[in-house]
Amino acid sequence: MFGLAELGHALRYPLSLWTWFMLPGALTAIGLLVLFGNDHGAWPIRSLDVLDTVRS
């Protein structure tokens, strides 16, 4: 998606309607997935102690 938007901008094509909605929508969806759908074992929400960091 980003490549097509950049190619259109480089070739001076007028921006399509999808670039105004799909690109921010994709970034928002990815951000929400990372924020709420993360694996708590991989990204602990709490701060880690030194021993927790060494053990993992």
Image (spheres, rainbow, N blue to C red):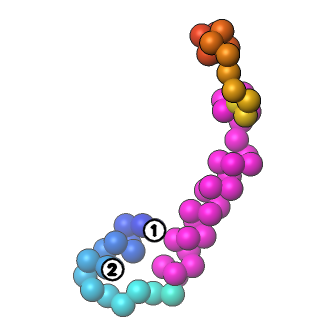
Residue 50, which numbered label?
none
Establish if 29 lies above or below 41. below
Looking at the picture, how far across and down is residue 2, in whole percent? 42, 67
Establish if 10 lies above or below 3. below
Category of crowding for the residue at label 2, using alpha-carbon neighbours closer than 10 angstroms: few (below 14), some (14–19), many (at least 20): some
Q: Is residue 26 left or right of residue 48?
A: left
Residue at image x 41%, y 86%? Answer: 15
The answer to which of marks 1 and 2 sits earlier in the sequence is: 1
Category of crowding for the residue at label 1, using alpha-carbon neighbours closer than 10 angstroms: few (below 14), some (14–19), many (at least 20): few
Query: Marks 1/2: CA distance?
Result: 11 Å
Quadrant housing residue 4: bottom left
Residue type highlighted by circle 1: Met
What residue is pinned by disc 2?
8
Residue type highlighted by circle 2: Gly
| Stretch of the chain drawn in magenta | 18-43
Looking at the picture, how far across and down is residue 52, in whole percent? 67, 14
Quadrant location, the C terminus:
top right
Would you say the magenta stretch is mainly helix, strand or loop? helix
Does the magenta run of residues contain 35? yes
Q: Is residue 2 left or right of residue 7?
A: right
Q: Secondary structure at mark 1?
A: loop
Residue at image x 68%, y 21%? Answer: 48
Choose between 48 and 6: the one closer to the eye.
48
Residue at image x 62%, y 55%? Answer: 31
Looking at the picture, how far across and down is residue 53, in whole percent? 62, 16
Furthest toward the bottom, the residue is 14
Residue at image x 39%, y 74%? Answer: 5
What residue is pinned by disc 1?
1
Q: Is residue 24 left or right of residue 2?
A: right
Establish if 43 lies above or below 18. above
Quadrant location, the N terminus:
bottom left
Q: Are marks 1 and 2 in contact (CB under 8 Å)?
A: no
